[in-house]
């Protein structure tokens, strides 16, 4: 496949769950060349833990995994994320496996052994889905966020954010529904400079004043969580 096409994978953050060491290594090496991030897990339980601690937009998983099957893991993921693209790998494309993959809304089903070209073509479909559905995030009450441009809007009017406000909102958006620690906020917003909890709280309150108070929840003693009342992708 042409490298100019593979550059479209630049925004993909992939969680690869595969217990076959050889296949996992081959796929990891191939995808790491072009994707923003690729993390690996060897079983379903490890995969689920990685999902909850990371920020992925594509899951590639085998079905027959130790500890927890890929399908059971995918069902747990679907409980908290209905949009993430899931690609199922299996050497056993039985009717039961196919129907189960449909039930968890898998975007593709790849039969082992497969060529990397097949995987690339499948990921290209995921790229189109991610761009079309996840470019806008509905923050409720008339507010929305353009993920690609990192811009906040009320209805159709852009809301001005300072550099630090923009960085702060961006990291909360990247972990929407999950708690972001004070340390994570400090490192991603202020980089090598220090920021006191009071400084972070001041910037949180500025974001609340430009949106609405309930959008950002304070997790006492730990950090903050973005909780839009309707965080569904928008079609624009």
Image (cartoon, rainbow, N blue to C red):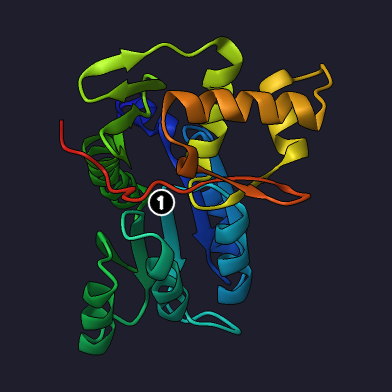
Q: Residues within 10 Å of mark 1 (few under 14, many from 20)?
A: many
- Residue occupying image coordinates x 22% and y 25%: 155
- Residue occupying image coordinates x 62% and y 66%: 49
Q: Nearer the viewer, residue 26 or 144?
A: 144
Looking at the image, residue 138 lies above or below residue 222: above
Which image quadrant is residue 66 in?
bottom right
Residue 62 spot, x, y in % from top left = 44, 71
Whether residue 95 appears in this view of the structure is yes
Q: Nearer the viewer, residue 60 or 29?
A: 60
Left or right for 213, reference 98: right
- Quarter of the N terminus within the rendering: top left
Whether residue 135 appears in this view of the structure is no
Residue 183 spot, x, y in % from top left = 78, 37
Left or right for 26, reference 196: left
Name, please, the residue furthest toward the left: 236
Residue 102 spot, x, y in % from top left = 21, 73
Looking at the image, residue 7 lies above or below residue 32: above
- Quarter of the C terminus within the rendering: top left
């Amino acid at each position: 496949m042409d490298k100019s096409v593979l550059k479209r994978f630049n925004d993909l953050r992939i969680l690869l769950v595969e217990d076959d060491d050889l296949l996992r290594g081959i796929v990891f090496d191939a995808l790491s060349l072009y994707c923003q991030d690729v993390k690996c897990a060897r079983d379903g339980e490890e995969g689920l833990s990685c999902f909850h601690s990371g920020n992925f937009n594509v899951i590639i998983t085998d079905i027959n995994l130790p500890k927890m099957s890929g399908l059971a893991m995918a069902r747990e993921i679907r409980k908290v994320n209905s949009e993430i693209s899931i690609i199922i790998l299996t050497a056993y494309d039985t009717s039961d496996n196919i129907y189960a993959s449909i039930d968890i809304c898998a975007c593709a089903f790849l039969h082992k052994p497969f060529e990397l070209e097949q995987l690339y073509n499948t990921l290209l479909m995921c790229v189109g889905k991610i761009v079309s559905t996840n470019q806008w995030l509905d923050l409720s009450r008339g507010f929305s966020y353009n993920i690609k441009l990192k811009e906040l809007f009320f209805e159709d009017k852009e809301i001005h954010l300072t550099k630090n406000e923009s960085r702060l909102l961006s990291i909360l958006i990247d972990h929407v529904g999950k708690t972001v620690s004070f340390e994570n906020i400090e490192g991603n917003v202020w980089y090598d400079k220090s920021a006191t909890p009071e400084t972070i709280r001041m910037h949180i309150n500025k974001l609340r004043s430009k949106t609405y108070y309930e959008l950002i929840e304070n997790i006492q003693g730990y950090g903050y969580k973005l909780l839009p009342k309707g965080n569904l992708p928008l079609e624009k």
